[in-house]
Amino acid sequence: MKASAVILAGGRSSRFGRDKSLLRVNNELLLERSLRRWGDMFDEVVIVSDSGCKFDIAGVTEVRDIYPCRGPLGGVHAGLTAVRNQWIFVAACDMPSIEKIFIQRLFDAVSGDSRVILPYHNGIIEPLCALYHIDCLPFAEKMLSMDSNCILDMYEMIPVHYLEAENCFFNINYPEDADSVCTAKENSSRRYKRRLHIFCGEKGLS
């Protein structure tokens, strides 16, 4: 299956204190580390940033948010708008523990009419390490044009396949998290929004 990778690098990094998309570990940007680990699985890679010109990485297209400051939904929307393939793998730029075998599991789960392949671990979904079909684009566009930002609401409109997965969702929230880039699999201090807990409970994910 030909697919595109979309890396989201436009967050505000408020908890980190500075733009973590520019954080270097062992003289390597976090997203460069990700591309080195799994980028060759895709025939197209797109970075969505707040400016559209933050990085200079050979073979990678960079675009800016069409709806700025609208969170993950805005980033997914911009990515879907920019790609040429039917499926995209979306990953946040600060998730260094993702491996090829996990991404392959997502693609192996594609079947039927599902238009999102959404992994979860211990009853918590991870919208920013998931597959989205191009058919999601009009729904994202409609929501954003109506000032609705919550990506969870889009999952009520389209067929979603929930895939139980191992925990590889460690991300960089605070400066001290950068010390664990090469070893951590989960965030010991991670806090999830109440609505996310409610959403997963309604779906019976545990």
Image (cartoon, helix red, strand yellow):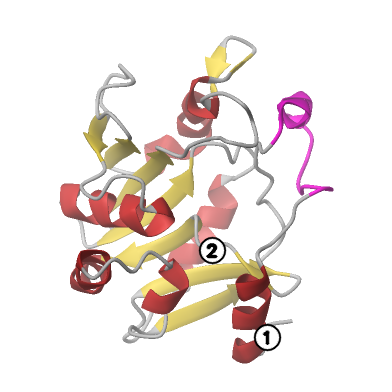
- Residue at (38% x, 81% y) in the render: 111
Q: Quadrant of residue 136?
A: bottom left
The residue lying furthest to the top in this view is 27
Q: Main secondary structure of the magenta part?
A: loop
Please name the residue shown 58% across and 9% down the image: 27
Side (left or right) of 180 relative to 147: right
The x, y position of residue 73, in whole percent, is 37, 59
The image shows residue 16, relative to residue 107, as above or below, that is above
Residues in magenta, as a range: 174-189
Q: Is residue 188 magenta?
A: yes
Q: Secondary structure at mark 2?
A: helix
Bin the neighbour count of mark 1 within 10 Å (Cα to Cα): few under 14, some 14-19, many 20 and up: few
Give the number of the mark in front: 2 or 1: 1
Residue 150 in the image: state x and y as whole percent.
43, 67
Q: Indicate left or right for 184 with 105 as reference.
A: right
Where is residue 10? Give x, y as percent. 40, 37
Q: Which residue is mark 1?
A: 201
Residue type (three-letter) at the residue carrying disc 2: Arg
Depth order, front residue of 102/152: 152
Residue at left 47%, top 80%?
Answer: 161
Residue type marked 1: Gly
Is disc 1 placed on a helix, strand or loop? Answer: helix
Q: Is residue 12 above or below residue 104?
A: above
The residue where tag 2 is placed is 105
Residue 25 pos. (x, y %): 63, 17
| Residue lying farthest to the front in this orientation | 147
- Asked whether the residues under the numbered discs 2 and 1 touch, taking CB atoms below 8 Å apart as contact, a structural biologist would say no
